[in-house]
Image: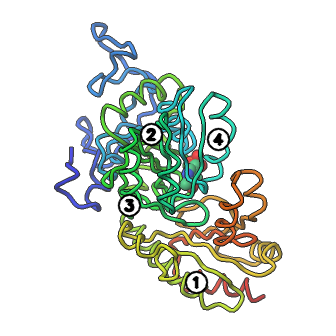
Amino acid sequence: MSSPKSEGIRTLAIHAGEKPDPVTGASAPGIVMSTTFVIDPDVSFSAEDFGAETPFVYTRWGNPTIDQLEKKLAALEGTGAAIAFASGMAAISGLLLHSLKMGDHFIMSDVSYAGAAELVNDFLPRNGIEVTKVDFSDLAAVESAFKRNTRLVYAETPSNPILRLTDIKAVAELAHAHDAQLAVDSTFASPIATRPFELGADFVIQSLTKYSGGHGDAIGGAVMGRVEDIARIRQGVGIHLGGIISPFNAWLIMRGLATLPIRMKAHAEGALEVARFLEGHPKVGRVIYPGLPSHPQHELAKRQMRNFSGMLTFQTEKSTETARRLAEKLKIVHYAVSLGHHRSLIFYLPTDDLLRTSFRMTREQERSYRAYAGEGIFRFSVGLEDPEDIIHDIDQALND
Ligand SMILES: *Cc1c(COP(=O)(O)O)cnc(C)c1O
């Protein structure tokens, strides 16, 4: 196995976790679609005895293709281990179930992926877990949210959809000073831009559906962390709750990961060009992109992100009308949810809807959200097409 210390990120993305097939000599990894494995009757297979060295028994416990994906993910994030799930939401809910129990307190950023925000609003309080949501760009607010029973802090950076950043190092220090752990959803950054574990986070979450897979054809998720933590998650959540990834999706995502470093470079280059173009467009109001000096946390972005990724947002006047026009007129860019694919995707997110269905905010938090998003924003996942073609497509649809 490759060591994350000695090799560059492009080499790791291609080779980590993989080796030529010892039987056939195949250079590319195969897909092992077997649910079960012929086993030695003398080996113990109780879930309690399950460890990294246990032979493959049953695919819900472990599978050679999924194992290769997990090793590659751990190498890219610089963690000891990774566990893959059927979706990003399965990874998030799995981590919450692993880390929290009745009577615990949980702190989350007030703006985060809508699915995660909704899960936390209803599911955790119903199970006796107290939730506090704060603006993670305000470190004093984060600090004052801690209670005696705070167990887990959950950040998303850059946050979906407004691209607000969290200073991972600072929040990790706060969490550890209060005997809590920090989990970071790093889907928008990818391990190419930010490696939260190296900045002090205990857990890293990825929706593999997005940049990791990168081609819009497979849903998956993962949690990365220390070897002993991931082993416990595998036992308590992976094996028992059973939300594991299919070997076929693991294979597709692994193939996507091989080109992640060079794709992220092209995503960031394209997004910067598009962001600059939109900033100068007469029909466009505010543009938010971590790589633009106008981003309120551009200094933090430069410090924490090695690549500004491919996500940006912008506002227009009469945005509902604009959304309809874009959906109708765009030829290259698809009007669709999701992000991080080679295809450019755009979607309109009305502020009132998000506030009502996903973010249950205080007045102050609402004011801060509206300062970023106005009445609503277009979330633009800049794909890998030629930037001039993307710009031309957006321009003709906006001006129509
Ligand atoms: C999409 C997304 C998720 C959920 O991932 P799925 O694979 O769709 O379940 C979680 N977090 C972020 C930031 C996302 O963008």
Residue type marked 4:
Leu
**How far is the residue under mark 2 from the one under mark 1?**
36 Å
Give left or right: position of 126 versus 266. Answer: right
Residue 363, horizontal then vertical, whole percent:
72, 60
Image height of 65 relative to 219, above or below: above
Q: Quadrant of residue 62?
A: top left
**How far is the residue under mark 3 from the one under mark 2?**
19 Å
Residue 362, horizontal then vertical, whole percent:
69, 55
Give left or right: position of 256 versus 6. Answer: right
Q: Which of marks 4 and 2 precedes in the sequence?
A: 2
Secondary element at tag 3: loop
Ligand 1 within 8 angstroms of badge 3 C-beta: no
Colour scheme of the rendered structure: rainbow
> What residue did someone put label 1 on?
389
Along the line of sight, the residue nearer the viewer: 193 or 298:
298
Q: Residue at x 75, y 89 (%)?
A: 399
